[in-house]
Amino acid sequence: MTDAPRPTDNAVFGQLMGGSPDATFGGVLSFMRRRYSRDLANVDAVVWGIPFDQSVSNRPGARFGPAAIRRASAIFDGDPQYPFGFDPFATLAVIDYGDAAFDYTQPQGFADAIAAQAGEIIKGEAQLFSLGGDHFVTYPLLKAHAARHGRLALVQFDAHQDTWPDHGGISHGGFVARAVREGFIDPASSIQVGIRTVAPEDCGIHIVHGHEIDTLGVAGVIGRIREVVGDLPAYLTFDIDCLDPAFAPGTGTPVAGGLSSREALAILRGLGTVDFIGGDVVEVAPPYDHADITAIAASTVALYYLGLLAERRRD
């Protein structure tokens, strides 16, 4: 008698809890093989794709980011996850909610559509982690989360401050200024890490420039973030161009001199005491990627977020 064949397609047929038995090279792709579902009952966290890139100022392609991040996440199997040392899905019930719905012929209505859908997802106890898409997607996500939790601290990993004027339009380079202006985030409790460009204004947000990583070190940046954010509910947004193009070539507006993937992940690992209530990873543009380098980095950011959430639940 032979053993039963290894199960496949955990994304469709698998259990809500626990790791996936799927081989990394086959099966239906969801984020880390989480079950595709729109049922939020007994769910701790939701992964959601937002395939939108109609507000970019340079190279398009981030609309393909959610699919690439899901594909890259297949390399994570059901074993204990590094660096946490346990399977986060033994603690957290996580689903892949699929992708957002919006009319691409009506980009001016995009923000309202995303804010409404995100609001429905988070109206209960489940947390939402979104896969972009260009960085404008964070604006309606902040709007929805602020409506649910009140004014937020923003922890932003990025090469750009995203505080340029948007003149009432939609722009991935202006969403932060707009969120400050509309009261979604508290600038005094917000921080941007990895900045390597100069914007017209800082909106009162604390900045750790890219070159400061050399002097502050990982521990220094972790301490700065904790000090700035304090006890305020925080939203994490990770623009993949925070990483140096050597570690994230697949993005629309790359800037040299950025963080290594190891540095960025080490900083994230040290933020377990921050009260994150939601997050996203954005600006993965697969047409400019090579061997899924950028998508792997982005999927690892999402894994770390879920790992921190699971660790907090365990504690």
Image: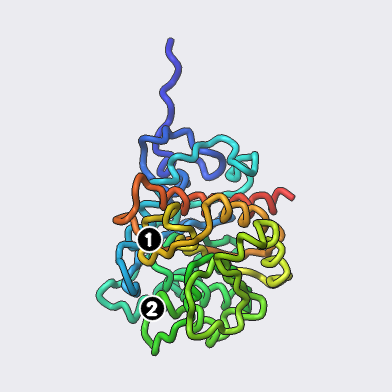
Q: Which residue corresponds to the image point at 48% horizontal and 68% vertical from the top-left? A: 159
Whole-percent x, y for residue 183 in the image: 57, 85
Do we see residue 130 in this rendering?
no
Query: Which quarter of the picture shows residue 287?
Result: bottom left
Question: What number is the disc on residue 251?
Answer: 1
Residue placed furthest toward the bottom: 167
> Which residue is nearer to you in this view: 56 or 45?
56
From the image, state whether disc 2 or disc 1 is nearer to you.
Answer: 1
Q: Which residue corresponds to the image point at 36% horizontal and 85% vertical from the top-left? A: 169
Check disc 1 and report its element: helix, strand or loop.
loop
Q: Which residue corresponds to the image point at 71% horizontal and 59% vertical from the top-left? A: 273
Query: Which quarter of the picture shows residue 249?
Result: bottom left
Whole-percent x, y for residue 200 in the image: 48, 85
Q: Amino acid at mark 2?
A: Ser
Do we see residue 104 in this rendering?
yes
Q: Relative to 11, is 232 above or below?
A: below
Quick check: 315 left or right of 158? right
Are dots 2 and 1 in contact, CB under 8 Å? no
Whole-percent x, y for residue 89 in the image: 58, 44
Q: Where does the N terminus fall, quadrant-wise?
A: top left
CA separation, marks 2 and 1? 16 Å
Of the image marks 2 and 1, the number of the one nearer the N terminus: 2
Query: Which quarter of the picture shows residue 152?
Result: bottom right
> Which residue is nearer to you in this view: 248 or 211?
211
Decide: few, some or many residues near mark 2? Use Cα within 10 Å; few <14, some 14-19, many ≥20.
many
Question: What number is the disc on residue 171?
Answer: 2
